[in-house]
Image (cartoon, rainbow, N blue to C red):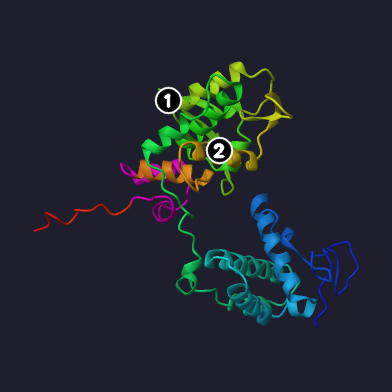
Amino acid sequence: MQQLPARPGRPSTQTPDIAPRGAAFDLAFDASLLAGQLAPSSMAMYQRDFIAYAAFAGSPAALLDAATLARWRTHLAQETQMSPNTINRMLSAVKRLMREAASQGYIPHEAAAAFADVAGVKAAALKDRIKENARVKIEPVAMRTMCDSPESERLIGLRDTALLASLASSGLRVSELAVLKRQQIRAKGSGFVVLVRGKNDVEYREAPLSREARAHIMRWLAERPVESDYVFTSFEGRGERVGARPLSVSGIWRIVRKYSDTAGLEDIKPHDFRRFVGTQLARSNLRMAQKALGHKRLETTARHYILDELEAGLTDDLY
């Protein structure tokens, strides 16, 4: 096998430093090659997928053989219940890392090209694995029911009301909402916006925020007994002792699940709130929906964030 270059400042070796779980060898490179190209959350996902591939490969020689990636694809399709989208994402992560490894001199460009030639799985072939509830449409009446569910007489209810209203009117990703700070909320004209920098944003962008959501936020902050730059902070220990630390992403997931269950809704996820905003805005202006969600391409909004269904009777008066 060709000797792999070591990282700067380290002696050359075939098996340098990062050891994946489940594999008996070290990796010459990992997702840190993509530093400066991806957000930390995306890099963490690339790292996880690459470690899984390395564990399947079992040796440095096999890891650098594109045929191993093809065999991994077959393994994932036959031996797991992963959706085709998940499998293709994992394959793409490995191919992206191999391409970057070639550009940095870790592997030959020919090797990276061989990885690029490995095809993904066909969604149609594994369509039974695509979950029906992967993207749940929330109707406005159901959204109102859910957002009105928290007990506003309790402090935790004030926070949760503000959180649900913010999700339902801003289209923020859960990772963006978790670290939202009060100084990011700005008045604009007769309304309000949130300055946010998402995973693909170079600069801060404006996201909408309803006057109702802003009012709930201000009430929560006025009643909160602790000072914190973060808008949505956690409750610590037993009881309702408010902390100054921001809510975690998993904490927001639990809140959404709690009140969606209370409202009689099933399989609701925080990202379904983002799709709700996109769907509602696109009914009047697709461009505004794209801008609100911060998508670079209009096609992304149209394809993945608009959940309108075909209405019966559309062709009744065509002739």
Q: Is residue 205 above or below residue 23?
A: above
Quarter where residue 12 is shown: bottom right
* Label 2, label 1: how far apart the Cα atoms are: 30 Å
Disc 1: which residue: 191
Q: Residue furthest left?
A: 319
Quarter where residue 285 is shown: top left
Residue 258, numbered label:
2
The mark closer to the camera, 2 or 1, is 2
Image quadrant holding the C terminus, namely bottom left
Q: Which residues are magenta?
A: 283-308
Task: Tell me which label, 2 or 1, sits earlier in the chain.
Answer: 1
What amino acid type is highlighted by mark number 1?
Gly
Residue at image coords 47%, 54%: 133
Residue 293 image point, x, y percent: 47, 44
Residue 124 image point, x, y percent: 45, 72
Quarter where residue 14 is shown: bottom right
Residue at image coords 44%, 46%: 275
The secondary structure type at the circle numbered 2 is helix
Magenta span contains residue 176: no
Q: Is residue 121 above or below residue 201?
A: below
